[in-house]
Image (spheres, grey):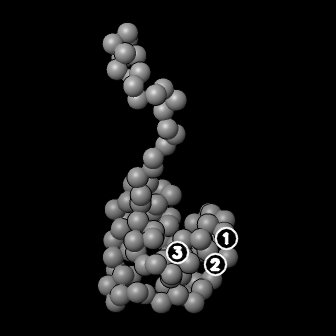
Amino acid sequence: MQVRPHHPEDLEQLRQQSRQQRDAKQRDRYRAVVLALEGHSAPEIARTLARSRRFVQLWVYAYRDQGLDAIAPKRQSGCPSKLPVARQQSFKDRL
């Protein structure tokens, strides 16, 4: 894959993040970008990480277009509560 680092220290920073990350999915995102920066192809990276080629392309292109912030973990919001905010306290009181 034809990807260049946004900053000279990005490659080392990505390697460090991939070693420290406990979440496997996030770790593979970092590793996919590292391998792409090292010049590996998308199918090679997908085989190495046991992920789909689409997974690899998604995260490598996100890095290519927007940098490290695009692949950083983000807080998941989850589903909104079905109970209206006005009734939450009365529900808690009943419990």
Front one among 32 and 49: 32
Instruction: Measure the C-alpha gap from mark 1 to mark 2.
Output: 6 Å
Task: Tell me whether circle 2 and circle 3 mark residues in contact (CB < 8 Å).
Answer: no
Three-letter code, disc 3: Ala
Q: Nearer the observer, disc 2 or disc 3?
A: 3
Three-letter code, disc 2: Ala
The residue pinned by badge 1 equals 53
Residue 53, image x, y percentages: 67, 70
Three-letter code, disc 1: Arg
The residue pinned by badge 3 equals 62
Residue placed at 39% from the left, 25% from the top? 86
Residue placed at 43% from the left, 78% from the top? 67
Residue placed at 41% from the left, 60% from the top? 73
63 left or right, relative to 11: right
Q: Nearer the observer, disc 1 or disc 3?
A: 3
Q: Mark 1 or 2 closer to N-term?
A: 2
Residue 76, image x, y percentages: 45, 49
Instruction: Measure the C-alpha gap from mark 1 to mark 3.
Output: 14 Å
In the picture, the disc for residue 42 is 2
Residue 8, image x, y percentages: 34, 89
Q: Mark 2 or 3 closer to N-term?
A: 2
Task: Tell me whether circle 1 and circle 2 mark residues in contact (CB < 8 Å).
Answer: yes
